[in-house]
Amino acid sequence: MEELSRVLIVEGKQDRIKVQRVLEDDIQILCTYGTLGLHALEEMIDEFLLYERDVFIFTDTDDSGVKLRKMLNQELSHAENLFIDRRYRQVEDTPDHVLASILQAANMKVKVDYLKGPEYYE
């Protein structure tokens, strides 16, 4: 199996499902299931060869998401950070068209329908 060159790190399973729904790109999405300990983070970095890949960090804006982002950035200084607006608090609660715009701005290919705002579906 060919390893994908890019990886997107999210916190929870629902975040991964939400992102997979709008992405069209072949990007590996890793789920941390919340805040990792340093040992678990080092194991994830080694297992998925994260020092050798393009890494994107996409966490929630709550305390645990900020803490996880900080830890990931310390270990993966080459990673690019993606941010949601604080009013959404969680990646999984971010509207699809907003999520698609954030991912597209990071040069990820998204499904075109998800770039349309809610007014398109009314």
Image: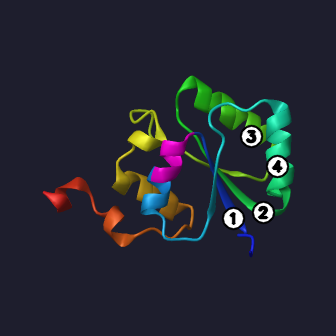
* Residue type pointed to by label 1: Arg
Residue at the disc numbered 2: 53
Residue at the disc numbered 1: 6
Disc 4 crowd rating (10 Å Cα; few below 14, some 14-19, many 20+) is: some
Disc 2 crowd rating (10 Å Cα; few below 14, some 14-19, many 20+) is: some
Q: Of residues 104 and 39, which is closer to you in this image? A: 39
The residue shown at (35%, 56%) is: 97
Q: Mark 4 and mark 1 in contact (Cβ < 8 Å)? A: no
Going from the N terminus, do you reach mark 4 or mark 2 first? Answer: 4
Disc 4 vs disc 2: which is toward the camera? Answer: 4
Q: Where is residue 16 in the image (x, y as percent from the top left)?
A: 53, 50
> Hey, which quadrant is residue 28 in on the image?
bottom right
* Residue type pointed to by label 2: Arg
Tell me the number on the disc at residue 77. none
Q: Mark 3 and mark 2 in contact (Cβ < 8 Å)? A: no
Rounded to the nearest angstrom, the CA distance separating label 4 from label 2 is 10 Å
Residue extending farthest to the front is 1
Residue at the disc numbered 3: 72
The residue shown at (19%, 62%) is: 120
Magenta-colored stretch includes residue 28: no
Going from the N terminus, do you reach mark 1 or mark 3 first? Answer: 1
Q: Where is residue 102 in the image (x, y as percent from the top left)?
A: 48, 55
* Residue type pointed to by label 3: Leu
Q: Position of residue 95 (x, y in %)?
A: 34, 48
Residue at the disc numbered 4: 45
Vertical comparison of 73 with 120: above or below: above
Q: Position of residue 103 (x, y in %)?
A: 51, 59
Q: Mark 2 and mark 1 in contact (Cβ < 8 Å)? A: yes
Rounded to the nearest angstrom, the CA distance separating label 2 from label 3 is 14 Å
- Span of residues in magenta: 12-17
